[in-house]
């Protein structure tokens, strides 16, 4: 099965907490603070695996979580870092933040590795918090949470040339003649239901990758036929090979066909419509093909396209066409990853909020990953630690947020296990 879209959850590992600990040795009183730092959480890394062709694996496994860092230990021991989690994807996989649509990575080059969610930093142990006035630091810092995303994976195959045209035009026949690919060929529309890739070798050492996609019909942009579903696979192509059944076997006019497909391409993306295009006038072995050829060629050449009369079925004119395409490709720029140039990029406007506050009666409930960790690592019996806690509430904006919600002196604030009366 060909699967070219998937939605998965990825979560990098949390950083381990720093700990509070004091040096202990027989006969030595009041040792200094020696609480170790937490280890870093593992990253989520995507890697291009050339052997993969679809996103089918992601149909079944949808959650990917990297290991968290371990907490620090006594005697300044740093916690072990969490292991990175490597997720393999086929070449051409675009990774987007599902919430904002922002492109996080475009996985193109074989072997390319990109960190998409970073593991949290480990927290500092109390060994770092001793100063001349604070000799007994009773607190340490929690690790940062690992980055977490719902991501959409979208496969846009990487091919130099994309075959476009109406169903039955002969696209798959062409691919089967010039490459080792064996797509299904038949005289009914929509024979091809999923993209096929083939390597086309032209002479010594020259080759390019060609993609055959399901046929388009008028109204594809409104979902007619198979719609635009597969056009994403020609988006990266440097050149389009537009195949037209010049014999009009299905009873349509070839010049009309040519224009309708171009109109559909334009409706899908103006950029795609401007992509260099070579035209194959196919099925010239049929009498009707010969009859229509001159008229078709005139009309299409007038628009500035190069036309190749061919008969794919009898492999006539196909070699010349492939040689011409290879020459054109030499002149055309390499395909660029979509990260920089892509038009759909939506940037995230705000950082994710580190906490949320809701009100129940006169109780203000503060929640969130970050705040939970701060509470978890605060020693509420230790003055210094408490001070650190209060400072954090202020610098991260919790106090301001409470004030904005209209909190009054004496109202209750609840943050997980702790509860206190609000005082200015
Ligand atoms: N006479 C003749 N028939 C051809 C030629 N090329 C293809 N055909 C026939 O046209 C029909 C459709 O060919 P396909 O290659 O399956 O067409 P397609 O464009 O891939 O069609 P879809 O996959 O349905 O979009 C088949 O019956 C082919 O044998 C040709 O040059 N001459
Ligand atoms: Mg086909």
Image: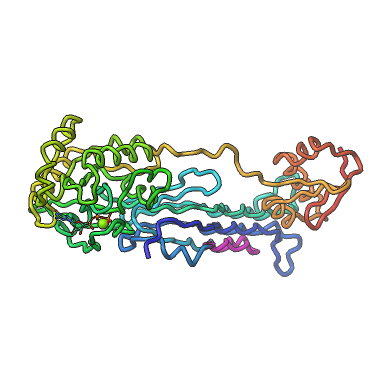
User: Which residue is pictured at 73% across the width and 64% down the height?
Assistant: 28
- Assess whether residue 70 is covered by the magenta stretch: yes
Chief secondary structure of the magenta portion: loop
* Side of 30 relative to 7 (left or right): right
Give the x, y percent position of residue 14. Answer: 59, 57
Q: Which image quadrant shows ligand 1?
A: bottom left
* Side of 285 relative to 351 (left or right): left
User: Which residue is pictured at 71% across the width and 54% down the height?
Assistant: 372
Q: Nearer the viewer, residue 338 or 415?
A: 338
Q: Quadrant of the C terminus?
A: top right
* Side of 360 relative to 305 (left or right): right
Q: Which color scheme did the rendering employ for the protein?
A: rainbow
Q: Is residue 127 above or below residue 297?
A: below
Quarter of the image for residue 40 reads bottom right
User: Which residue is pictured at 79% across the width and 40% down the height?
Assistant: 402
Q: Nearer the viewer, residue 133 or 92?
A: 92
**Residue span colored magenta:** 63-81
Q: Nearer the viewer, residue 134 or 370?
A: 370
Q: Residue furthest bottom?
A: 26
* Side of 189 relative to 302 (left or right): right
Query: How many marks can you see?
Result: 0
User: Which residue is pictured at 66% across the width and 54% down the height?
Assistant: 142
Q: Nearer the viewer, residue 152 or 79?
A: 152
Give the x, y percent position of residue 144. Answer: 61, 52
Give the x, y percent position of residue 187. Answer: 23, 59
Give the x, y percent position of residue 404. Answer: 79, 35
Q: Residue furthest front?
A: 251
- Assess whether residue 154 is covered by the magenta stretch: no
Q: Quadrant of the N terminus?
A: bottom left
Q: Is residue 229 above or below residue 71?
A: above
Res. 209 visible in picture: no
Res. 358 visible in picture: yes
């Amino acid at each position: 099965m060909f699967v070219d879209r998937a939605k998965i959850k990825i979560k990098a590992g949390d950083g381990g907490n720093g700990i509070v600990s004091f040096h202990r040795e027989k006969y030595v009183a009041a040792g200094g603070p020696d609480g170790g730092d937490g280890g870093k959480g593992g990253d989520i890394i995507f890697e291009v695996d050339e052997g993969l062709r679809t996103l089918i694996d992601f149909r079944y496994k949808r959650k990917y979580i990297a290991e968290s860092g371990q907490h620090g230990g006594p005697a300044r021991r740093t916690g072990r870092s969490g292991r990175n989690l490597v997720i393999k994807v086929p070449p051409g996989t675009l990774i987007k933040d599902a919430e904002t649509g922002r492109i996080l990575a475009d996985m193109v080059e074989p072997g390319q590795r990109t960190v998409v969610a970073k593991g949290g930093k480990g927290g500092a142990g109390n060994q770092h918090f001793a100063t001349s006035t604070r000799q007994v630091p009773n607190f340490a810092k929690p690790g940062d949470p690992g980055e977490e995303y719902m991501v959409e994976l979208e496969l846009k195959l990487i091919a130099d040339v994309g075959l476009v045209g109406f169903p039955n035009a002969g696209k798959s026949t062409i691919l089967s003649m010039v490459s080792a690919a064996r797509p299904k060929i038949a005289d009914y529309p929509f024979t091809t239901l999923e993209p096929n890739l083939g390597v086309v070798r032209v002479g010594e050492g020259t080759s390019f990758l060609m993609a055959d996609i399901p046929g388009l019909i008028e109204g594809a942009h409104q979902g007619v036929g198979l719609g635009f579903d597969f056009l994403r696979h020609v988006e990266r192509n440097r050149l389009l090979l537009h195949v037209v059944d010049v014999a009009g076997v299905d009873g349509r006019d070839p010049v009309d066909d040519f224009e309708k497909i171009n109109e559909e391409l334009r409706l899908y993306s103006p950029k795609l419509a401007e992509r260099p295009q070579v035209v194959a006038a196919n099925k010239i072995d049929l009498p009707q093909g010969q009859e229509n050829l001159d008229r078709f060629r005139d009309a299409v050449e007038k628009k500035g396209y190069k036309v190749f009369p061919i008969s794919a079925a009898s492999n006539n004119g196909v070699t010349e066409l492939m040689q011409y395409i290879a020459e054109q490709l030499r002149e055309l720029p390499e395909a660029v990853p979509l990260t920089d140039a892509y038009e759909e990029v939506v940037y995230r406007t705000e950082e994710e909020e580190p906490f949320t506050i809701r009100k129940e009666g006169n109780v203000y409930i503060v929640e969130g990953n970050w705040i939970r960790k701060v509470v978890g690592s605060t020693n509420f019996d230790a003055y210094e630690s408490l001070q650190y806690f209060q400072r954090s509430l202020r610098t991260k904006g919790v106090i301001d947020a409470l004030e904005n919600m209209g909190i009054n002196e004496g109202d209750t604030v609840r943050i997980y296990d702790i509860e206190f009366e609000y005082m200015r």
